[in-house]
Amino acid sequence: MFCGMSCLPMVNATPNRHVDVVIGLGPNGMSDQFSVEVPNGEIVKAVDGISFKIKQGETLGLIGESGCGKSVTALSIIRLIPKYSGKLNGEIYFNNRNLLELSENEMQSVRGKEIGMIFQEPMTSLNPIMNIGEQISESLIKHLRMSKNSSIDRVLELLQMVGIADGKRRIKDYPHQFSGGQRQRIMIAMALSCEPSLLIADEPTTSLDVTIQAQILELIKELSRNLGLSVLLITHNLGIVARYADNIAVMNKGKIVEYGSCEDVYKNPRHKYTIGLLNSVPRITGPIFKELATIQKEDINEKD
């Protein structure tokens, strides 16, 4: 059974906390666009001159097709792009601190506690030789200084929250003993365990059935509203963004081609790529056998 906020006691609730995430704008709003350069025979900009802001309690939907730079942007925020495979240019401000200037030790205290992330591929993110109870409690013990017994109680609450039945028994199971959807739920529990200020959700409902998808997204929405949680929601699903995000950034080939409120972008799209995405969504009205629109090559290559 799915449980909402009543199943999630506040470990370190701070409803009045102030959270702002600013990427590529500088501390005073001055333009300093962010980019990620990767070596590929020649220098390629996987993320090319982007900028956006997420205010406290807001959800920004970052949308685009696979390979457009969404996940690279997410990994850059928590500085998980290896130095040998990418160079980060610009500034990323979180609570008035430029994350690109922090030491690795300082970033380790930010990851998991202040910024949580739901990764797209849970099987490659979970440790195959640790049971899931140990993996979820690890951050609780490190960041919140919980005792082992207290952390286990919290783990059981989190497992119930994300829909893992029989938590007392399954807490000692290993990742390979869970289905793909269950592993994703475990990743969500880990990301929310320390009640971070910013949640980066990279395709958070991958491998989940439609009912659990809605429950997880509703939970994230409720957390954002009740705790002032800022959310970066990365997806290719236009319907999810329309329902759960306040603002939307449309990404194509490393660039943000359109940015604004969901209502404005959906009602009045300006960029041809955005229009193509919206037109490619199947409709339940109109001719039954109408051919879906395709995004033309010239639309993809357009830089405006």
Image (spheres, grey):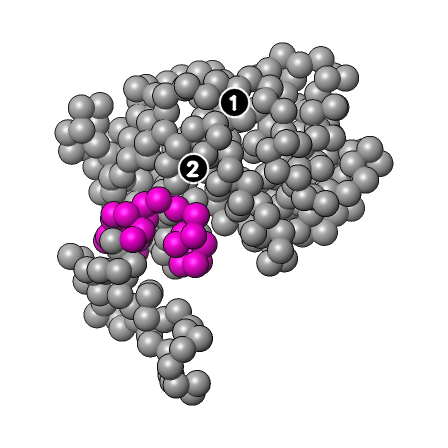
Give above or below for 202 relative to 265: above
Give above or below for 93 relative to 217: above
Q: Position of residue 152 (x, y in %)?
A: 74, 23
Q: How many marks?
A: 2
Disc number placed over residue 62 in the picture, else none: none
Q: Position of residue 60 (x, y in %)?
A: 36, 42
Secondary structure under badge 2?
strand
Secondary structure under badge 1?
loop
Q: Does the magenta segment cover residue 250? A: yes
Disc number placed over residue 113 in the picture, else none: 1
Residue at image location 76% in from the left, 39% down from the top: 174
**Foreground pick, 255 / 27:** 27
Residue at image location 25% in from the left, 48% down from the top: 259
Q: Which residues are magenta?
A: 236-263
Disc number placed over residue 231 in the picture, else none: 2
In the rendered structure, the answer to whether residue 49 lies left or right of residue 228 reads left
Q: Position of residue 195 (x, y in %)?
A: 54, 26
Q: CA distance from mark 2 to mark 1?
A: 14 Å
Which kind of residue does numbered mark 1 sit on?
Lys
